[in-house]
Image (cartoon, helix red, strand yellow):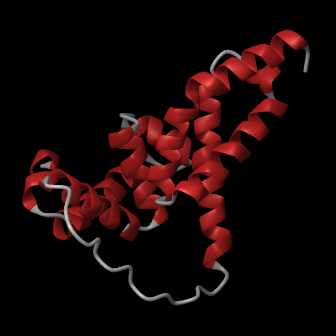
């Protein structure tokens, strides 16, 4: 990588890492896993930087989604170790919004990875069904049905004040 390309890549990383971490965290539900996912995506992007300079963020986001799905598929073939449920946090910060965010986060983590990816792409990333279908390599109808199922499950798991906006 020449000095100019390296400077552009460094600037891209500095400017877009926070947004990429937000998306990765929504996909994984874990800060450390999100950091690993972003780091791996940026490493892959650096190797192809000359070819992706026109739209690097879209390329890196696609790597995030694909690596997350690939990781889920790998883990699915290995048995999981059962863990005790995490207890509810003690005390409150005085706002209902905090508790609703926790409930929404927990509900998102209960969604299957494909449904979670559809929800993140459609509603956090504000992408169309067509764009989501292209990113995930499926049909628009699949995206619509996965989104519908995911939203129905989220409505069951999260109280009405949050889900009212989704109807």
In the image, taking residue 108 as reference, residue 37 lies left or right, namely: right
- Name which residue lies at 20% across and 58% down: 100
Q: Nearer the viewer, residue 84 or 124?
A: 84
Q: Nearer the viewer, residue 76 or 91?
A: 91
Question: Could one spot residue 77 in this view of the protein?
Answer: yes
Tell me: residue 13, above or below residue 40.
above
Tell me: residue 75, above or below residue 152.
below
In the image, taking residue 54 as reference, residue 106 lies left or right, namely: left
In the image, taking residue 37 as reference, residue 113 lies left or right, namely: left
- Name which residue lies at 58% across and 37% down: 61
Judged from this view, the residue extending furthest toward the top is 4
Q: Quadrant of residue 108?
A: bottom left
Tally the marks: 0
The quadrant the N terminus occupies is top right
Q: Nearer the viewer, residue 32 or 61?
A: 32
Tell me: residue 87, above or below residue 38.
below
Judged from this view, the residue extending furthest toward the right is 2
- Image coords of residue 137 (percent x, y): 56, 48
- Image coords of residue 147 (percent x, y): 32, 54
Tell me: residue 154, above or below residue 117.
below
In the image, taking residue 4 as reference, residue 113 lies left or right, namely: left
- Name which residue lies at 67% across and 82% down: 78
- Name which residue lies at 58% across and 33% down: 17
Question: Could one spot residue 163 in this view of the protein?
Answer: no
- Image coords of residue 105 (percent x, y): 33, 60
- Image coords of residue 75 (percent x, y): 64, 74
């Amino acid at each position: 990588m020449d000095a100019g390309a390296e400077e552009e890549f460094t600037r891209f990383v500095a400017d877009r890492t926070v947004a990429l971490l937000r998306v990765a965290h929504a996909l994984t539900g874990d800060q450390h896993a999100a950091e690993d996912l972003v780091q791996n995506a940026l490493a892959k992007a650096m190797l192809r930087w000359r070819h992706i300079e026109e739209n690097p963020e879209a390329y890196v986001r696609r790597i995030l989604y694909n690596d997350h799905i690939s990781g889920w598929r790998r883990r699915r073939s290995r048995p999981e170790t059962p863990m005790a449920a995490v207890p509810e946090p003690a005390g409150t910060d005085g706002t209902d919004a905090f508790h609703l965010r926790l409930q929404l986060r927990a509900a998102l983590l209960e969604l299957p990875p494909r449904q979670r990816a559809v929800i993140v792409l459609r509603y956090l990333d504000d992408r169309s069904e067509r764009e989501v279908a292209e990113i995930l390599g499926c049909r628009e109808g699949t995206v619509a049905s996965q989104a519908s199922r995911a939203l129905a499950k989220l409505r069951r798991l999260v109280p009405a004040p949050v889900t009212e906006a989704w109807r």
